[in-house]
Image: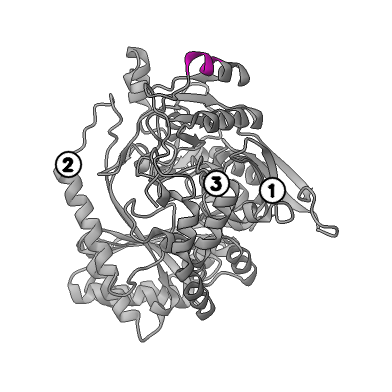
Amino acid sequence: MKRRDCLKASLTLPLLPLALKAAGATPTGWARARPGTPGWPSATDWEQLSRAVGGRLSVPQSPFLGDAAARSEALAQISNPFYIGDQPGLTQTSGYFGAWRSVPSAQMVAARDSADVAAAVTFARRHRLRLVVKGGGHSYHGTSCAPDSLLVWTRAMNQVQLHGAFVPRGARPGTPPQPAVSVGAGAMWIDAYTAVTTQGGRYVQGGGCTSVGVTGLVTGGGFGSFSKAFGTAAASLLEAEVVTADGKVQVVNADHEPELFWALKGGCAASFGIVTRMTLKTHALPHTFGGVSLKVQANSEASWRALAAQVLRFYRDTLCNPHWGEQITFGGERVLSIAMVFQGLDRATAEATWQPLLAWIQARAEYTVREPLQALAMPARDFWDADFFRQHAPQIIAEDTRAGAPPTHMLWKGDQGQVGWFLHGYASAWLPSALLGEDRIENAADALCAAAEHMDVGLHCNKGLFGAPADALAASGATTTHPAVLDAFALALIGNAGGPVYPGCGGTVDEPGARRGALRVNRAYAALGAVVPQAPTYVSECDYFQKGWQQAFWGPHYPRLLAAKRRYDPDGLFLIHHGVGSEAWSDDGFERRAS
């Protein structure tokens, strides 16, 4: 974090208590309605809403609790994220130990357009309902899941439209047109990549997991494999259509409602409204994308720490640049795993890049190469083309196996383990570039090795922007994401999870195992704390119980975000766990806290 950002924080932090008090202006004792309590809509009220949305109001159900045929299909598709995402009663994560479980809402509007969304928002406001919105449903914190709520399900709003020369609505004179893509609220990244890259020959900065919803990722900040080159996904946002708490459909951009537009660029849209469409800048496509893998084991603690330090130096000197992204993992049994991607390099160049590290390892008897270096390069236009992988590398992908599924639906096989998982613990920390200095790099290596004694630590190099080009840094710096991301060389991620535990699926929570898993995550995170105490973190991948979350997620931006929340949603209709303004509400979101 640069000195000027520290100065901003020192000026804004004393104002935070006053801002929080102002945000709680609604009288205490104000509560949302629940089924069976006074104020819950009558059957006539629900019928009126149903007519307003063209009959697309229903009670969402878990297919695991349906009839024999539905349950059989659900069990067969339990590892298929596209199937899970198409079920309004399910979420991609089945819960988080000690925090939440995947439970369907009480009622659901299957929105087809912004008018349906506006009708649902107006109804929820009038009847004081807990409101949730779900497109992709990938939130680790269960933000698209709440019992006794009204769900706005945007899955059908998945249109993707390319623009050769886009100018935001009402932009100031002289605003230059630029290539862009407009994406509906229910679209997944595979939808966007298919249109923009496979078919259109350009690039849009999105997420690495292809079944993640576009809207949720962008408005949470958003990182993908190549963020070190192109910046965060939020940095590419040019315009958004959003339904605000008053039920109005607004188009916002840098020149119209700029504060709301800024809040959507990393402040989590579900705290401010429901985004129904967004337009993102697209970029010239590199000539190649590719990946590199390697696995090495050290035979002693001393050699393990030496390897860790050498890898950090190698990363600093060779890989911390726009060409490289993804993961370096420090694992149990002193195993280093490399699973990185690159852009703009051919295979020979990528392989040659790693030769100095390989030579260092091979010159020492205390290391065993468990999996030799492998590199794959391809035309960038084929990187999300399912047909290409079916022909050339079917082992890398998994597919939507349902009859009649779109042939474009593919995901990286390594992401399949996240489908339905039940998180025991999760934590992350942005690692500042200062740790790569010679005066601190040995300590950083020791901390990583100490953490890995408890739980694998993955360095997601693309989720820290140190080493990115100036234009990517400038655009990402204009978002609400914590400024620490600009100086971070990686996001350290630590997690532990079990299999799916949706009600009716047959899975159960191993509570002793979950407690042990959570404890191991906490101990690994504490070991990292030796070099990054009270580290800022990424709102979409972090501990559900994150302490000081306002500062950890947004730092000096939080008071401004809170002011925007009060302006656009003064009664707190839009609420998510640890979202802007959520400190004014009970954990379940139904009761106002005392001021």
State how far apart marks 3 and 1 are (Cα).
19 Å
Residue beneath disc 2: 511
Q: Earlier in the sequence, mark 3 or mark 1?
A: 1
In the image shown, does 500 or 398 lie closer to the viewer?
A: 500
Q: Please give left or right for residue 593 compared with residue 233 in the image.
A: left
Q: Earlier in the sequence, mark 1 or mark 2?
A: 1
Residue furthest to the bottom in view is: 439
Q: Which residues are magenta?
A: 42-47
Query: Disc 3 marks which amino acid?
Result: Pro
Residue beneath disc 3: 570
- Point out residue 315 in the picture as x, y percentages from the top left corner: 43, 72
Query: Disc 1 marks which amino acid?
Result: Val
- Point out residue 112 in the picture as x, y percentages from the top left corner: 62, 27
Q: Is residue 159 above or below residue 491?
A: above
| Mark whose residue sits in front, 2 or 3 | 3
In the image shown, does 389 or 31 lie closer to the viewer?
A: 31
* Mark 3 closeness class: few <14, some 14–19, many ≥20 residues within 10 Å: many
Residue beneath disc 1: 252
Image quadrant where residue 475 sits:
bottom right
* Mark 1 closeness class: few <14, some 14–19, many ≥20 residues within 10 Å: many
- Say which mark, if any, is on residue 508: none
